[in-house]
Amino acid sequence: MIMKSMVPNTLVFLFGFFLLFVNVSELSAQEAPADKPAKAGIETRIGYLRAYEPQLALSVLDIPPRDEGVAGASVAINDNNTTGKFLNQSFALDVTETKRDADVVPAFKEMLARGDRFILTDISARQLLSIADLARENGVLLFNVGATDDILREEECRPNVFHTAPTRTMLADGLAQYLVWKQWRRWVLLYGSHDNDKLYADAVRRAATRFGATIVEERLYEDKGTARRTDTGVIQVQKQMPVFTQNLPEHDVVVVADESEVFGSYVPYRTWTPRPVAGTAGLVPSSWHPASEQWGGSQIQNRFVKATGRRMLSKDMQAWTAVRILGEAVTRTKGNDAGQVEAFIKADDFSIAAFKGQKVTFRTWNWQLRQPILLGDGHGVVSTSPQEGFLHQFSELDTLGVDRPETRCKLN
């Protein structure tokens, strides 16, 4: 009796609930937009303009890899995307190649037409200056990841050009601090005949004066235009280098300035007097070293090796740092507007981690990235500058390179 009376009541209740569900569903459908668009993500295109031609070196082990620099940028793009996927942001790399000493303006204009507003440059100082003002007129930020010329940060500095590559003066100062710390204060300077060699030699002279070393003699090695490796057999080199370094004054170290790779690699172990060699050969200052694993360096090295099959070089780290700076700026500003990104990077509290023992920052007077200089040979890192005891009232990193009171940069 009770069961029979409950069945109709239950059916009525269920039918009423069904009608209510249908009405609510129809009401929701009426209120919702007919074609609601999906939330659009933020895609940031980062250009990479490089002047590339195959380069020779005195040793086949020193020939730069085909993807030098670009590989570092690619790994950083992946790092940015790892974080960006949680924030609906994505990053893409746009690589454009031109020849060394070529006019890069047409290639740069093509990048502008594709919408690149953040561009890494691995080109000569002359090429960079040819596009710097055009970039500024179009709201483009440039990141110099290759050129070490001090003039780009001094007389020819630009407010829209950031430099993650160190200067020659930073490299020379990093080396000089270590040599002075070792009490090797008497130097012989051997330098090449090409313009870049002479600029490196100038940086060495400046560093010697700055830190209390003495260059007891200088010798110029003229490039006679030989075929380098094929014309310089072991026997010839073994005889030539001792003669070239004979009858030198008493000295502690031989400093080589040979960016052009004409003779520098032949100096170690072949000098007339047995002395350590440093500079562009022997103990070499750089922004990074393939064997660096301190301060978490093994993490970036492992990711890089997994992605590329080789160890990370200085230019790779310089490009990686530039892309990570952009990634950090886009993430923090929640957009890729060039003006907002520039303002974020130029803020007083901006810094970025770069696996070098401390956060690195930009010098506000010329937009050069402050960074430690690693000193290494072919197998490992020997030391890192700034060295202990070289103090500065603001940042010890400013003991490397041109400091604010010395700068000739006048940013508009």
Image (spheres, grey):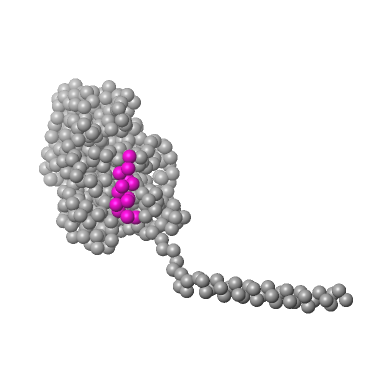
Q: Which of the 4 image quarters holds residue 87?
A: bottom left
Residue in the foreground of this view, choosing between 371 and 39: 39
Q: Which image quadrant is residue 179 in?
A: top left
Q: Nearer the viewer, residue 245 or 142?
A: 142
Q: Is residue 337 highlighted in magenta?
A: yes
Q: What span is colored magenta in the figure?
A: 336-348
On the picture, is 300 further left or further right than 271?
Answer: right
Front residue of this view, candidates 52 and 324: 324
User: At x 44% / y 44%, what residue is drawn?
Assistant: 299
Residue 29 position, x and y percent, is 53, 73
Residue at 51% x, 71% y is: 31
User: In this orientation, does residue 2 appear?
Assistant: yes
Q: Is residue 330 above or below residue 380?
A: below
Q: Residue 161 placed where, x, y %?
A: 24, 47
Q: How many marks?
A: 0
Q: Residue 278: where, in percent of width, then height?
A: 25, 32
Tell me: residue 284, above or below residue 39: above
Which residue ends up furthest to the right in the rendered image?
1
The residue positioned 25% from the left and 50% from the top of the image is 142
331 left or right, relative to 240: right
Q: Main secondary structure of the magenta part?
A: helix
Quadrant into which the N terminus falls: bottom right
Can residue 61 be seen? no
User: Image quadrant for the C terminus?
Assistant: top left
Direction from residue 20 to residue 313 in the image, left or right: left
Asked if residue 286 lies in the magenta stretch, the reply is: no
Residue 90 rendering spot, x and y as whole percentages: 39, 58
